[in-house]
Amino acid sequence: MNFPNWQTYLVTQASLSEGRSTLEIVEAAIDGGIDAVQLREKDTDARRRYDLGLEVRDLTAEAGVDLIVNDRVDLARAIDADGVHVGQSDLPVSVARDLLGPDPIVGCSASTVAEACEAEAAGADYLGVGTVYGTTSKDVDPEQDGVGPERVAEIAEAVSIPIVGIGGITADNAGPVVEAGATGVAVISEIAAADDPRAATEALAQAVETATPLENGGITNE
């Protein structure tokens, strides 16, 4: 297993970036110390996402930051990303693993303990758990929206792979997510829509670093 150890994770979405390009946001987040970037951009066509992905790959590779592609295993391979993140309605984790091989990172979204355990058993390297506080950044089933740090804690107790909390997370409310057992937090608007994305990244990282996690963060290396 790859066990990524991310504390701050940027999910890109140009439509939420206040008129700035995704490259501008990624550069600022890298300068602010981001640990991982997920290329999302769901409202763009495959060719545009590929071209943008190559540029983002150059930035992240130079900075030593992991690049994950949302949903698209083919795109992750095409731009030599570090891995892929799949949702419950995307390719199964096991299929993504078979297509990518043993080395790339495969993450999976989970909002329940059952989904989390199934993803771990299928070979996921980490989980994106949420939405924690609710979100306006994407369409989410009401039953999966606003599950709270309590659900993060339940999942952390049930699995032995890292958890990244996502959904409505800010520097002000990231602490309880980490305290519940998440190793890190993923955000879109908190960085992309910020007046100063670099400062927003730094503030988010500070909030995560100063939180007191559960012992081992729910993770073992067995």
Image (cartoon, helix red, strand yellow):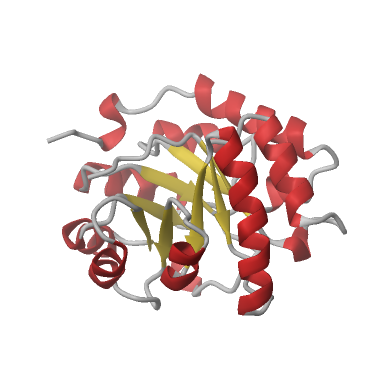
Which residue is pictured at 18% across the width and 33% down the height? 221
Q: Which of the 4 quarters of the picture holds residue 178?
A: top left
Quarter of the picture containing the N terminus is top left
Q: Which of the 4 quarters of the picture holds residue 120?
A: bottom left
Q: Which of the 4 quarters of the picture holds residue 99?
A: bottom left
Quarter of the picture containing the C terminus is top left
Which residue is pictured at 32% across the width and 28% down the height? 214
Q: Nearer the viewer, residue 104 or 156?
A: 104
> Percent from the top left, x then y, of residue 202?
67, 28
Please say whether residue 131 is visible from this viewpoint. Answer: no
Please say whether residue 5 is visible from this viewpoint. Answer: yes
Q: Would you place residue 141 above or below residue 210 in this image? A: below
Q: Would you place residue 2 above or below residue 127 in this image? A: above
Left or right: 59 in relation to 95: right
Left or right: 96 in relation to 30: left
> Percent from the top left, x then y, of residue 56?
64, 52
Q: How many marks?
A: 0
User: Going by the picture, which residue comes out furthest to the left?
Assistant: 222
Q: Would you place residue 158 above or below residue 17 in this image? A: above
Which residue is pictured at 63% across the width and 33% down the height? 204
> Percent from the top left, x then y, of residue 6?
45, 36
Which residue is pictured at 70% across the width and 31% down the height? 31
Q: Nearer the viewer, residue 174 or 19?
A: 19
> Percent from the top left, x then y, of residue 29?
68, 38
